[in-house]
Image (cartoon, rainbow, N blue to C red):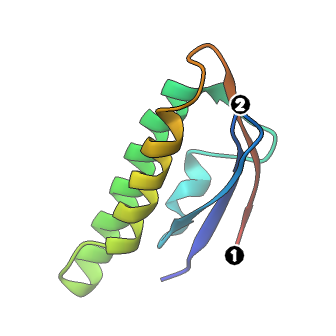
């Protein structure tokens, strides 16, 4: 499957490289996109869930790395100010 990494900058200035086992993330995120932390987490849940479902359909098991990526996103989001935005800096292969 074609992997992708979503590169984001959190409101506290931290950068994060989020793994996806599928290009589906390109339907949810694009370079330069800004969104509130809660919205970003919701989109990440949807995108990584669908990406993991694609792995399940192809290989018979969900993607553990996608689940781990989501856990890292949720942990990072928990320490961010609510009213601040996440910036998507890019998507890379």
Q: Which residue is mark 2?
A: 11
Tag 1: Cα neighbours inside 10 Å, few (<14), some, or many (≥20)?
few
Which image quarter: residue 5? bottom right
Establish if 51 lies above or below 32. Answer: below
Query: Disc 2 to disc 1, how far (Cα)?
Result: 24 Å
Secondary structure beneath label 2: loop
Quadrant in which the C terminus appears? bottom right
Residue 82 point in image, percent of width and height: 56, 17
**Residue 93 shown left or right of residue 37 in the figure:** right
Query: Which residue is depicted at the point 47% across and 54% down?
Result: 72
Which image quarter: residue 34? top right
From the viewer's side, name the closer residue of 2 and 81: 81
Establish if 82 lies above or below 56. Answer: above
Q: Residue furthest left?
A: 60
Sooner in the amino-acid sequence: mark 2 or mark 1: 2
> Would you say the residues marked 2 and 1 are in contact, meaning their CB atoms lie under 8 Å apart?
no
Residue 38 point in image, percent of width and height: 49, 25
Find residue 93 and name its label. 1
From the viewer's side, name the closer residue of 65 and 50: 65
**Residue 41 shown left or right of residue 61 in the figure:** right
């Amino acid at each position: 499957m074609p992997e992708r990494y979503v590169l984001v900058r959190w409101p506290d200035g931290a950068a994060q490289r989020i793994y996806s086992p599928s290009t589906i993330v390109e339907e949810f995120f694009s370079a330069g996109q800004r969104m509130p932390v809660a919205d970003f987490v919701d989109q990440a849940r949807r995108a990584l869930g669908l990406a993991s479902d694609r792995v399940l359909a192809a290989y018979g098991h969900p993607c553990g790395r996608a689940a781990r990526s989501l856990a890292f996103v949720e942990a990072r989001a928990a320490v961010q100010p609510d009213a601040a935005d996440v910036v998507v800096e890019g998507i890379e292969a």
